[in-house]
Amino acid sequence: MTLRTRVLLVLSALLLTLAPTTPTALARAASPVATTSADTAAAASSSKPRGAEVVAVTPVADRQVDLSVRSAALGGRTVGVRLLTPDGWNPGDRRQHWPTLWLLHGCCGDYTSWTALTDVARIDSLRKVLVVMPEAGWNGWYSDWWNHGRGGDPAWETFHTVELRQLLERDWAAGGNRVVAGLSMGGQGALLYAARHPGMFKATAAYSGSAHPLLNEESVDRILGYFGGQGDDPLRVWGDPVAQRGIWQAHDPYYLAKRLKPVPVYLSCGDGTTGPLDTPGSTSALEADFNRQNHALAAELERVGAKHVTTNFYGPGTHGWAYWQRELHASLPMLLGALHVGG
């Protein structure tokens, strides 16, 4: 069976299982009314944005603000970034910069997923930090795509770690004190960003993350199936897993374990069988695969001498939001501790 045939078969199976004003005024706003372009300009600094710029600002709920960001790394496209703001947040006050938690969504979700599907906006300890929830594409994989050697759009890693980071820290009161967490595809992204950008994040947490996509043929086929979602060419992301092996390894957290050694890491995953938060009879081959991947990464972190690894391999449990909400709560003491923010 050819690689492309295997990818199409895996993709077919996967698709059946997909889960479904002024700065001061922005900090207080709770109604979903978009600001004008003049309001947006007033909220940003007078310096010309480099690489990315905010083109619209929309308050969506108490302490929630959506930024529409036009990105050079994404070919000039505009994508959403949701901010969950701390009490007293005022991006017009240049003296105040807030510790920042980046929360990354999974495949087939978007920048609204965390607030729509968890209680993150109601967690009291997060009233002391700026929570950044950026768009990463339906299946962007937190990577600058290879595009058959041409590079270019989409360059999600560059958008997040360079363009958006600089934009938020320049104009929206984000500080340089950062941690990152994510689920599934976003769990892989959280591990990759912490490993590939030393010093950028002080801790990382991955919930049911794709932690070792090169584990075996099943794992490779599964991620290629996701790469091929929405009619995409699956080889655009990292190339062929054999011919472009180096690119694959550079985006596989297992092979970056030494870079994660100094970083506090939280890993959690179920085993894919019916768990306490599932409907009776639910199973998940995806979660079972990611469980094996996370065990492999945990063992590799131990082998390289990582001293700050917390694991919660909780046994029965499928690939679902009820578990990811629970694990966010469980990992927050570690994440906030790394930010030196009390829980």
Image (tube, rainbow, N blue to C red):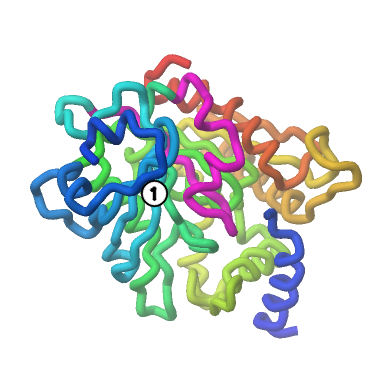
What amino acid type is highlighted by mark number 1? Val
Residue sitting at the far right: 281
| Residue 67 in view | yes
Give the side of residue 261 with respect to residue 339, left or right: right
| Identity of the residue drawn at 15% across and 25% down | 95
Viewer-side residue, 186 vs 28: 28
Queried whether the magenta region covers residue 198, the answer comes back as no
| Residue 79 image position (x, y, % from top left) | 38, 59
Viewer-side residue, 253 vs 319: 319
105 in relation to 232, above or below: above
Q: Quadrant of residue 270?
A: top right
Dot 1: few (<14), some (14–19), or many (≥20) neighbours within 10 Å?
many
| Residue 115 image position (x, y, % from top left) | 53, 39
| Residue 195 in view | no
| Identity of the residue drawn at 37% across and 31% down | 85
231 in relation to 185, above or below: below
| Identity of the residue drawn at 71% across and 67% down | 15
| Identity of the residue drawn at 74% across and 76% down | 9
Q: Quadrant of the N terminus?
A: bottom right
- At mark 1, the secondary structure is strand
Give the side of residue 67 with respect to residue 232, left or right: left
* Magenta stretch bounds: 97-126
* Residue, disc 1: 81
Q: In which quarter of the image is residue 324?
A: top right
Give the side of residue 170 with respect to residue 313, left or right: left
Q: In which quarter of the image is residue 44?
A: top left
23 in relation to 141, above or below: above
